[in-house]
Image: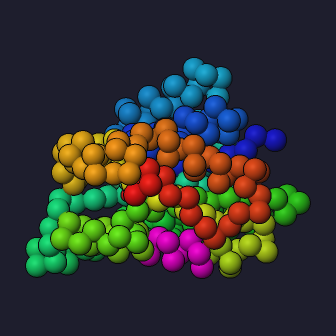
């Protein structure tokens, strides 16, 4: 039976690399996107060209009704979910605490935290019902910032990722008996558009020499860690994290 995965924020960056890798590994993949429909369709086309199966699914992960509709469309289009990658996230420009508005804080928390909760909830409902107690696996994309705090830069973002870590640990214990594993990946500085569209363009190149491996990471290198945690090779691994941060 084909395994079905949903990757949120999969039109670009780490989500895109993960969707393509999971498709190569034989998953049918739900490619969630927020606004960039053409980029999401391009990911689907690329998967189909390799003989795989995929579906572009628009939804704002912070919106409960949209998340429920997305999971409904996934059920109908690809079948019962066995793997979820919570990846959609936002980062705003560098700011210190005095510059943080309630609007910004709430926006970061609603996407990076509420969005992860809602998708976990819908995924667990489905994985708990899979035949023969097969369950499923969830990977939450956190950040090295969850433990480092990002002082003077993005404490709102770092706090949201701290919540992702705690959600991951708590949920892993809650659903373990149902055969569902929940783990996290903490990327370090990865070459994606997130830095240009939210944080600081060129940031990875600016900091790379100070990193232990003296280079930024590539989306594929994070995707590999995510795919391993989802795979049967990680069947006794739950409630834990892989640092994909080049030793940071
Ligand atoms: P990215 O900006 O390239 O991709 C994020 C994707 O999420 C985009 O496609 C965006 O449209 C989507 N998205 C944002 N809000 C959404 C919403 N409400 N609903 C649905 N989709 C939404 O960034 P990326 O670097 O690929 O980030 C992926 C994940 O990795 C994020 O959770 C991010 O916090 C995490 N991360 C990235 C880095 C890095 O250096 N790039 C480091 C640590 C953690």
In the foreground, 122 or 120: 120
Q: Residue at x 76, y 40 (%)?
A: 2
Residue 167 drawn in magenta: yes
Q: Position of residue 9 (x, y in %)?
A: 43, 49
Q: Residue at x 67, y 39 (%)?
A: 27
Q: Is residue 24 left or right of residue 202?
A: right
Q: Position of residue 44 (x, y in %)?
A: 52, 31
Write down the quadrant of residue 62 in the picture: bottom left
Instruction: Characterize the magenta stretch by its predominant secondary structure.
Output: helix
Q: Is residue 45 left or right of residue 75?
A: left
Q: Position of residue 127 (x, y in %)?
A: 72, 62
In the image, residue 132 above or below residue 75: below
Q: Is residue 112 left or right of residue 70?
A: left
Is residue 119 in view from this perspective?
yes
Query: Which residues, given as a range, are shown in magenta?
Result: 163-170
Q: Residue at x 20, y 66 (%)?
A: 153
| Quadrant where the N terminus is found in the figure | top right
In the foreground, 75 or 182: 182
Write down the quadrant of residue 149 in the picture: bottom left
Q: Residue at x 28, y 68 (%)?
A: 150
Q: Position of residue 157 (x, y in %)?
A: 31, 67
Write down the quadrant of residue 109 in the picture: bottom left
In the image, residue 212 above or below residue 62: above
In the foreground, 245 or 171: 245
| Furthest residue toward left | 98
| Quadrant where the C terminus is found in the figure | bottom left
């Amino acid at each position: 039976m084909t395994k079905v995965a949903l990757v949120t924020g999969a039109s670009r960056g780490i989500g895109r690399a993960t969707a393509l890798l999971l498709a190569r590994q034989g998953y049918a993949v739900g490619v969630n996107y927020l606004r960039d429909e053409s980029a999401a369709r391009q990911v689907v086309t690329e998967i189909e060209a390799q003989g795989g199966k995929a579906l572009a699914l628009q939804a704002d992960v912070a919106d409960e009704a949209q998340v429920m509709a997305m999971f409904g469309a996934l059920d109908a289009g690809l079948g019962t979910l066995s793997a979820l990658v919570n990846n959609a996230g936002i980062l705003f420009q560098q700011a210190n605490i005095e510059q943080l508005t309630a609007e910004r804080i709430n926006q970061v928390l609603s996407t990076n935290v509420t969005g992860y909760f809602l998708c976990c909830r819908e995924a667990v409902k489905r994985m708990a019902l899979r035949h023969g107690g097969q369950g499923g696996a969830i990977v939450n994309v956190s950040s090295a910032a969850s433990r480092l705090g990002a002082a003077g830069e993005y404490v709102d973002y770092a706090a949201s990722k701290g919540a992702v870590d705690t959600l991951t640990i708590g949920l892993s214990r809650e659903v373990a008996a149902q055969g569902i594993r929940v783990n996290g990946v903490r990327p370090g500085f990865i070459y994606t558009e997130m830095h240009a569209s939210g944080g600081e363009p060129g940031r990875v190149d600016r900091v790379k020499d100070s990193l232990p491996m003296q280079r930024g990471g590539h989306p594929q290198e994070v995707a590999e860690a995510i795919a391993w945690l989802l795979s049967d090779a990680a069947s006794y691994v739950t409630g834990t994290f892989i640092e994909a941060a080049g030793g940071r």
